[in-house]
Structures are given as C-alpha cells and as structure tokens.
Image (cartoon, coloured by chain):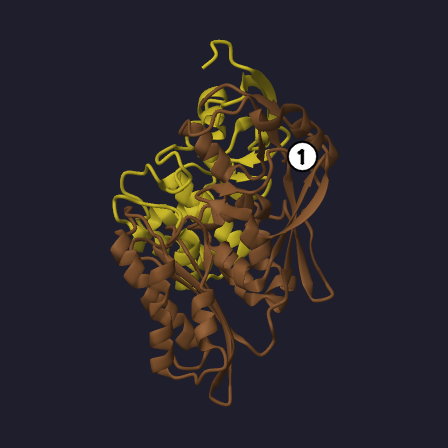
Amino acid sequence: MNDFAFHAPETLDEALGLLAQHGADAKVMAGGTSLTTLLKQSLIAPGHIVSLHRVRECAAIEASDGVIRIGGLATQRDVELSPVVKERAPLLAEAYRRVATVRIRNVATVGGGVAQADPAMDPPPSLLILGASVVAKSARGERVIPIGEVYADYYETTLEPDEIVTELRVPAQPSGAAWTYIKYLPRTEDDYATVSVAAIGRAEGGSVADVRVALGAVAPTAIRASVVEDALVGQPATSDALREASQAVSEIVDPTDDPRGSAWYKRDMSVVFTRRALEQVLGLA
Amino acid sequence: MTTTPVRQSVTVTVNGQEYVREVPTYRTLVDFIRYDLGLTGTKEACSVGVCGACTIELDGRIAASCITLAARADGATITTIEGVADGDNLHPVQEAFINHGGFQCGACTPGQIMAAKALLETNPSPTEPEIKEWMMGNLCRCTGYYQIIESIQAAAEAK
C-alpha cells in the first residue's frame, strides 16, 4: 500500500471541504471494504484518504410520498434488514441481502457501493428497474442523478472527485407486481454473480401489463433490457413469447472471459436467466 | 512510495483493555492487532475479505480486519478471539467446537468462532440453512464444514 494522509472529519461539510481542497488526489472512504482492497493491491495510490467513519449524518432509511430515502452512509446490512425497505421494495432488500457475506454487509455502505460501480455487484440491476436516483453532494452544491447515468464503465461513474453520495432515492415497487432477483452462482454462494437478473412484472388477462428487466455482471455496467420490455408489453404472456423476447439480450450484453465463466457462456446464460426471471414474474414458472 | 510513512495515533479498546499506538496510515487492522498489539489469534489468509480468517467484532458487528484500516478503528471497541473466553472458562461456542471436532488444522478457527458467536447473539436458535448462510463467509480448507455446523447447533442448544 502507498503512503497517504488520513483524514477523519466529524461532519459531512468538513469532509466536502477536504475533497474541495485535495481534488482528484483524495479518495472518499465510507465502509472501506472495496477501497482498502484497491489500496492493498496498489490499483489506486491517492495522496489523501477522507474517511467518513466519524460522520454521523446520511445513515437514515426513511420513506415519504412513495419514495424510499436511503442515506449514503447506511450499511448494506441496514438496507437488508430495514422494515421500511422490506415493506416498500422487497426486491431491493433481497438484492442487498445477496451481497457478499454478512461480515462485508455490516461495513460496506450504500453510497460506497454506488461509487465503486462494480458491474457484478448485486444491487445495480434492481436499482435500475426501480428507477433509483443518486444524490451527490459537493462543496459546490447538490445534484440528483438517475442511477443509469451514474454508471459509466467498469468501476467508472459520472460522479466528480469532490462529490459524496449522500442519498439513494428509490421509488417504492409497484404493488401487485411480482418480482425476482436471480443470482447465478456456479462456484460458491458468497461469490459475485456470473450473471444476475432482476425483474418486476405483472400479467393481466393473459397479457403483459408491465415488465422491467435488468442484468448485472455481463457488461461494463449493469444494463436495463429495454429491448425485451418493449417486445413484451401489451403482448400475450406465453412461454413462446418470453422465450423469443429473451433472445434479444444476447445482442445487448458485452461480457468478458473471467474465472466466473467465458464470454460466450455468460452470453448464453444471460438469455436463459432472463427467460427464467420473466417466467417467474409473469406467472409462467 | 515515500520513505517516511505518514503516522496516525490509534486508540482502541480491545477485549476490555485500552491501547494507544502510533502506526503508518496504511496499517491494516489485522496487522495492527497482530503486530502492534501482539494478539496473534486473529489470522490473515486471503487478504481480500473473502475467507473469514481475520473476522473480529468491531463496535458490536463482525467485520473483516484485513480490509479495514487501523486508522478507521480509532476510538472503536473490538473483541478478538483472545477476548471470547471468560478467564479459564471457555465460551459455549469454543466448548462446542472442541467437543464436536469443529476444526482440524485450526487456522480458520478463530474466525469461525467469532462468526458463530455473532450468529448466536443475533439468532439464538438458528436453523441449519440459517447457519450455512451466515457461515458461508468463513472458509475451512480441511473440509470440516459438517462438524462446524454440528458445533454451532450444539452451542445453540447448550445456551
């Protein structure tokens, strides 16, 4: 690990001031589970670490007007266990429950996960189909960014170096719709997914009234499968229709070969698990 | 790489005793516990938070000390494997691991005990699937998983 100055501000404003002062030479550390690993592997070498472990703001989970507001410093374990989240967005509680192990979720934060932007993380597909947005704050002000515009590339976001994710806003799940999160794990239970699929859907009178699908771990960012959604909405909810619509994901995924599977295998499995997710949420499983 | 490390004062309460040490900012918590405090029960194996050997209790929740900076633990209350027994009286989880053969080489055992103890404090009567889900982050390369599960079930019943 390289040498760095370690800052432990007591307030968010103090932290934002340090980031304004040190710019791109500073890295924000929330839970630190990902950042410490990057430091240990010398993949990053910042001159300054601004640790948020003393900051007591931005950790609440509340809901109002159909929107769940999750503080950026809430831990992933907090989201998994939150009655507010479980009641209004059970898909989100399940997605966070599947992250790594309890030892990691106890420490890793919601905002840290957003900023880390690993496309194989569990929450992003669910955040995409729930229409989440990210509140990013800096000494210059605050902006609200749709989650799909935050993820830019592998471990790359459109967040600025002086910004901190202070809140995640997630609209409640549509009531009456079925949901699923499939995490395909051919190796071990605590692994990152080889392919993950989140879906929400509702069939009415034999037709697809609503369907939303997104995939993780098979492209530089989590991706929404709009091509599948558009092909199905208003159409009869039949096994053949779902099978045919699922084929389209092979055109939008862009996986890489790694120990979790070859690119062609992940492409094939993207189609298979999209179909299974659709069958589950549209009552054809 | 600079030659003079930036140093940081770290005050922690570990197993009820307060320690103050000055360490480089890049010191990980597992190295701090082992080499600055001399408490070598906590092990480092994978170094990336996956295997569970370095599991400790940090402010009431289990955490991976290999991917935590010591500087972040300033002011924290920590329990390591050395603080689990009450003097000569072993913790029920420790007793159960001995009585049910919950270990072979022992390298993963401090982490297994810390995780199992936290499980039973959260859920005093876990089902087998609940034990497996909670403990999946603690790897044992001697393949002693069945005995580990039996040990935890026995400790739950003993309480």
Vertical placement of residue B159 versus A35, above or below:
below
Instruction: Name the residue that disc number 1 marks.
Output: A54
Q: Nearer the viewer, residue A186 or B40?
A: A186
- Which residue is drawn at the image coordinates 48% and 59% (left, top)? A125
- Which residue is drawn at the image coordinates 46% and 52% (left, top)? A99
With A91 as the anchor, is A231 left or right in this view? Answer: left
At numbered mark 1, what does the secondary structure look like: helix, strand or loop?
A: loop
Residue A18: x, y in percent? 68, 27
Residue A31: x, y in percent? 56, 39
Residue B116: x, y in percent? 44, 49
Any part of residue B156 in sight: yes
| Apparent colour of chain B | yellow
With B127 as the anchor, is A72 left or right in this view? Answer: right
Vertical placement of residue A225 versus A156, above or below:
below
- Local packing at callout 1 (Cα closer than 10 Å; few below 14, some 14-19, many 20+) is some
Q: Nearer the viewer, residue B10 or A54?
A: A54
- Which residue is drawn at the image coordinates 64% and 37% (left, top)? A163
Q: Nearer the viewer, residue A18 or B53?
A: A18
With A136 as the anchor, is B120 left or right in this view? Answer: left
Vertical placement of residue A68 versus B137, above or below:
below
Q: Quadrant of residue A284?
A: bottom left
Among the chains, which one is brown?
A
> Outermost residue, bottom direction?
A205
- Which residue is drawn at the image coordinates 28% and 62% (left, top)? A268
Q: Quadrant of the N terminus of chain B?
A: top left
Residue A133: x, y in percent? 62, 54
Q: Nearer the viewer, residue B64 or A276?
A: A276
Amino acid type assigned to the residue bearing label 1 in the image? Arg
The chain ID associated with circle 1 is A
Any part of residue A57 in sight: no
> Outermost residue, top direction?
B3
